[in-house]
Image (cartoon, rainbow, N blue to C red):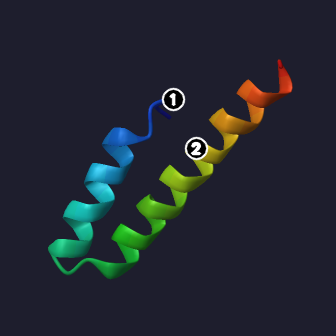
Amino acid sequence: MPLVPGILITNAIRDLLAGELLAGMSRGVEAALTAFAIVLVSQSFY
């Protein structure tokens, strides 16, 4: 799992534009959860 969700977001958008709704939504949720986890961990140190 990459720690930078930019690639996941790009793949999610690509899947959605290709008509793969389930794959695009699942990748989008994974990207959002990864971004949320990064923010949560970074905020716990301050």
Q: Which mark is residue 34?
A: 2
Q: Looking at the picture, how far across and down is residue 7, in whole percent? A: 32, 41
| Residue farthest along the top direction in this orientation | 45
Spatial CA span between label 2 and label 1: 7 Å
Left or right: 5 with respect to 14? right
Q: Is residue 6 above or below residue 15?
A: above
Furthest-left residue in this view: 18
Find out whether the residues at labels 2 and 1 contact each other: C-beta distance under 8 Å.
Answer: yes
Q: Position of residue 43 (x, y in %)?
A: 78, 29
Number of numbered discs overlaid on the protein picture: 2
- Could you say where residue 34 lies in the image, as x and y percent from the top left? 58, 44
Q: Which structural element holds mark 2?
A: helix
Quarter residue 28 falls in: bottom left
Q: Residues within 10 Å of mark 2 (few under 14, many from 20)?
A: some
For residue 34, above or below residue 44: below
| Residue 19 to residue 42: above or below | below
Q: Is residue 22 left or right of residue 46?
A: left
For the point 42% across and 59% down, the residue is 27
Determine the residue positioned at 14% across, 74% down.
18
Q: Looking at the image, is mark 2 or mark 1 earlier in the sequence?
A: 1
Q: Amino acid at mark 2?
A: Thr
Type of amino acid under label 1: Leu
Q: Quick one: label 1, few (<14), some, or many (20+) residues within 10 Å?
A: few
Q: Which label belongs to residue 3?
A: 1
Q: Quadrant of the C terminus?
A: top right
